[in-house]
Amino acid sequence: MDKLLICGGRPLQGEVSISGAKNAALPILCAALLTAEPLVLDNVPALRDVDTMLTLLQRLGVQAQREGSQVHLQADALTGHEAPYELVKTMRASILVLGPLLARTGQARVSLPGGCAIGQRPVDQHIRGLQAMGAQVRIEHGYVVAHAGRLQGADIVTDMVTVTGTENLLMAATLAEGRTVIENAACEPEITDLARLLIAMGARIEGHGTDRIVVQGVAQLHGARHRIVADRIETGTFLCAVAATGGDITLRDAAPETLGAVLDKLRDAGLEITTGPDWIRARMRGRPRATGFRTSEYPGFPTDMQAQLMALDTLAEGTAVITENIFENRYMHVQELCRLGAEIEIDGHTAVVTGVAELLGATVMATDLRASASLVIAGLAARGQTTIERIYHLDRGYQCMEHKLQALGADIRRLS
Ligand code: EPU
């Protein structure tokens, strides 16, 4: 299994390009199921999760070819309607085929994702919404088995804000008969990006980017070309890294407008940030200031940045109080950060981080994607060598992370 070896203590300097967003690319790839015509997607990140999704789509009969960061998809002859356990267990986002498959073919059989490292993560809201649209759904042998004639527009209020739940219902509603209103919808930029693609395919959608999305169903969608929005979590991760190591970096091909709460917190921590339409420059001098935060739905502070900003707080002047409000078990990086010398106490959903003057390199283990990113940040700032094991988690969501960090002057390498 691959490991990362980091010799910490070097400030980051230079420029890197941000890749397309994983969490926008995954639903957008599934949108190919909604039409028989070709989709051309640009800025698709080269990630393990994207490869898994392409494998799943191909099993369903979608033709998929990748050329660099461009992906061509065509679902003119769907041959299957099942997302099997062996794929779903490696990537929960496989549930995103449920809504489009059902809307296009009237049937879907998708393995229940089951719990994962960061929490239970049920999909009851996806199912309830599809039932409201007239689908017959039952759970059978660990699978969500759904049937429908043409889906019917419905008024849906989700019990909580769910990102992939909103995406599944949004995609299903584009081909339903009549009007669907999704209340308490997620407002994440990835939803907006998906809606933009669907509109380019002929869907009639209003209110995306707000908590009330209105979709007027159409009989068919057509082909389109779309560029995936920049990855705000990758961007935020590099910003936390430079805030932890010091230095001066510029991130190209970024989308600063999607990062409001993250930029605010990093400015509070002492990072000097300037932005242009598609770039962010960040300079850090001196020690960071402790910055407490609570994770929440967009436009609040994203749970996907919690571990990375916590890594920065471990080195800050002062004490930071952090509350994780989205997932019930998203503090697995804490033990590993403590192995590097961090002082963190957990009480339920709250973590209290008392900044230390320095971290010391050690061997640590990555437990999930964003936890891995936090360990990379801590390792870059720590004195001496840090070895991060189980780095495959990182490859699910960060394109060439160690190459990008090398380009910024970090001493980081992969051991296969
Ligand atoms: N929830 C339910 N029932 C549902 C759906 C969600 O109880 O039917 C709960 C979840 O258990 C959780 C909360 O609602 O406590 C929010 O979950 P959400 O459905 O929004 O999460 P998700 O759609 O499964 C996406 C991202 C995650 C990101 C979360 C929150 C994708 C593919 N995944 O997950 O990304 O953390 O939204 O923003 O978009 C990551 O990239 O590292 C990652 C985990």
Image (cartoon, rainbow, N blue to C red):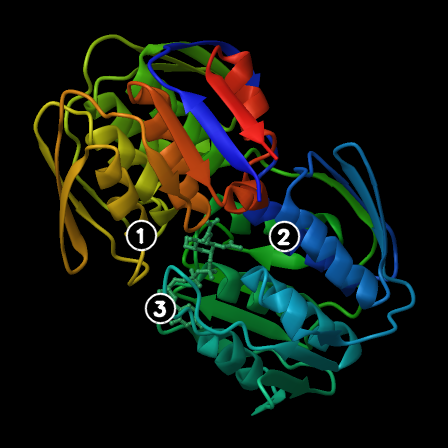
Residue visible at 57% across and 85% down? 142
Where is 370 relative to 356, above or below?
below
Give how far across and how far down residue 350 sits, in percent.
Answer: 15, 52
Asked whether, in this view, residue 263 is left or right of residue 22, the answer is: left
Amino acid type at circle 1 is Met
Out of 16 and 401, give the one closest to the viewer.
401
Total numbered circles: 3
The reply to whether the residue tagged 3 has its Cβ within 8 angstroms of ligand 1 is: yes
Give how far across and how far down residue 343 sits, in percent.
Answer: 14, 37
Asked whether, in this view, residue 209 is left or right of residue 353, the answer is: right
Q: Which residue is mark 3?
A: 160
Amino acid type at circle 2 is Leu
Q: Which residue is mark 1?
A: 332
Label 3 and label 1: CA atoms lie apart by 24 Å
Q: Residues within 10 Å of mark 3 (few under 14, many from 20)?
A: few
Q: Is residue 256 visible?
A: no
Q: Secondary structure at mark 2?
A: helix
The image quadrant of residue 111 is bottom right
Give how far across and how far down residue 17 sits, in percent.
Answer: 58, 21
The reply to whether the residue tagged 2 has its Cβ within 8 angstroms of ligand 1 is: yes
- Which quadrant is the C terminus positioned in? top right
